[in-house]
Image (cartoon, rainbow, N blue to C red):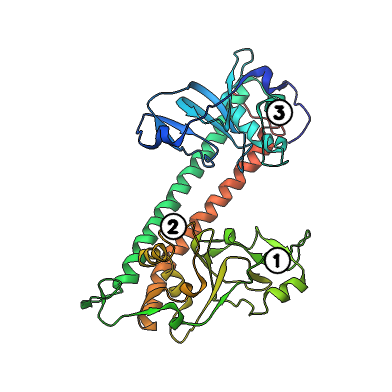
Amino acid sequence: MSSAVPEGWGNLPVAEVFEVGRGRVISKDEIRDNAGRYPVFSSQSKNNGEMGRLDSYDFDGEYVTWTTDGAYAGTVFHRSGRFNCTNVCGTLRDKGVYAVDMRFASEYLSTVAKNHVSYVGNPKLMNGIFGEIDLLLPPLSEQKKIASILTSVDEVIENTSRQIDKLQDLKKATMNELLTKGIGHTEFKDSELGRIPKSWEVVPVEELCSEIVDCVNKTAPVSEQPTPFKMIRTTNVRNGRIDIENVRFVSEETFKVWTRRGALKEGDIVFTREAPVGEYGLVTKPDGLFLGQRTMLYRPDETKTNPTYLMHCFATNLTKKQLEDMTGGSTVGHMRVPDCSKIKFLKCQLEEQNAIVKVLSSVDNRIEQVAIKLSQTESLKKSLMQDLLTGKVRVTVN
């Protein structure tokens, strides 16, 4: 953000404009069985969610809140109504001394708060430091106009996110239907995994793969500078995709050592067997990638299975139930390497596999289109915030 103060704007410390407060300790026991009317917000409120509800409330009105401790330290929200905050939330209430729109203030502070987080030990942004942050304040009419513009973009982002959620739900339902009942079957039989088409088989995943390879189970030394060699950690594997942007880099020498059991190829499936158990992703761009700790490689035998079909099998309810049984019912637990070869899938003819993949890919394509729209809208909001909240572009107020 620019340090220049636009003509007609003020520049004031947060503590001069707001009463700076904090939430309180609220135990899980206090809200566990309580379906109260008033939400409780905490450090886990990354997407403005809530951790539970109470019958009583501590805050009533319009506030700016922020996360004071942990991974989300410096995350700012606008709150209104009656609610509660845990002790890892700071709160701002208008003193009534200056003309301030709370939505404008929350938008502005969201752009600068992270710059004041201390990363000595656990990330922290405590009340005293937050109170010293400078707040740019245009005239109230400009604040309201800017907040209105940004809120309208937020509504598009929220609606688009909901659309993606609905498509994801549609995909899950379609996937579980197709991967257990197939396409056009009229005759079924009992199996150890339930009723399945008569022509299908139950097989361990090792029968559908040409190779199953465990990672090198120690931490690879990382490079401080970007290199062409990228480590896939468990955090990079989610919902069928592998994030190759937010990775750690290694040297070429380290890459060669960590791929001595075999380099990744297009069509391979990466699986997480710990922290958490059961995430999966299809390799589409293998160059320079290698397995980090607690991950496995499945190489589909393409004479027996379509790699995308096999990848979808990891997401079914049938597979999730097996993983729960193998890990004692906890996805935060640990899965033994030998068990990773014993997961049982339903096998059908390649022709039917390809047909199932075609249906699911059409839903994936729609999700991708909407995700692109979401990304574009989020980029638009960032651009608008940079322009409007600094006064670089002035709004016209009727």
The mark closer to the camera, 3 or 2, is 2
Q: What amino acid does circle 2 point to?
A: Ser
Q: What amino acid does circle 3 point to?
A: Ile
The mark closer to the camera, 1 or 2, is 2
Provide the secondary structure element on which disc 2 rests: loop
Q: From the image, tell me which residue sits under label 3.
A: 129
Report x, y in % for residue 28. Answer: 44, 36
Residue 23 vs residue 163: left or right? right
Determine the CA span between mark 3 and mark 2. 40 Å
The mark nearer the N terminus, 1 or 2, is: 1
Q: Quick one: label 2, few (<14), some, or many (20+) residues within 10 Å?
A: some
Determine the CA span between mark 1 and mark 2. 27 Å
Report x, y in % for residue 189. Answer: 22, 77
Nearer to the camera, 26 or 316: 26
The mark nearer the N terminus, 3 or 2, is: 3
At a point 78% along the width and 29% down the height, the residue shown is 4
Q: Residue 51 carries which label?
A: none
Residues at discs 3 and 1 in contact (Cβ within 8 Å): no
The mark nearer the N terminus, 3 or 1, is: 3
Report x, y in % for residue 206. Answer: 46, 80
User: Dividing the picture into quarters, in which one does residue 6 lie?
Assistant: top right
At a point 53% along the width and 52% down the height, the residue shown is 373
Q: From the image, tell me which residue sits under label 2.
A: 330
- The answer to whether any part of residue 395 appears in the image is yes
Q: What amino acid does circle 1 point to?
A: Ala
Provide the secondary structure element on which disc 3 rests: helix
Residue 246 vs 37, above or below: the answer is below
The mark closer to the camera, 3 or 1, is 1
Q: Quick one: label 3, few (<14), some, or many (20+) residues within 10 Å?
A: some
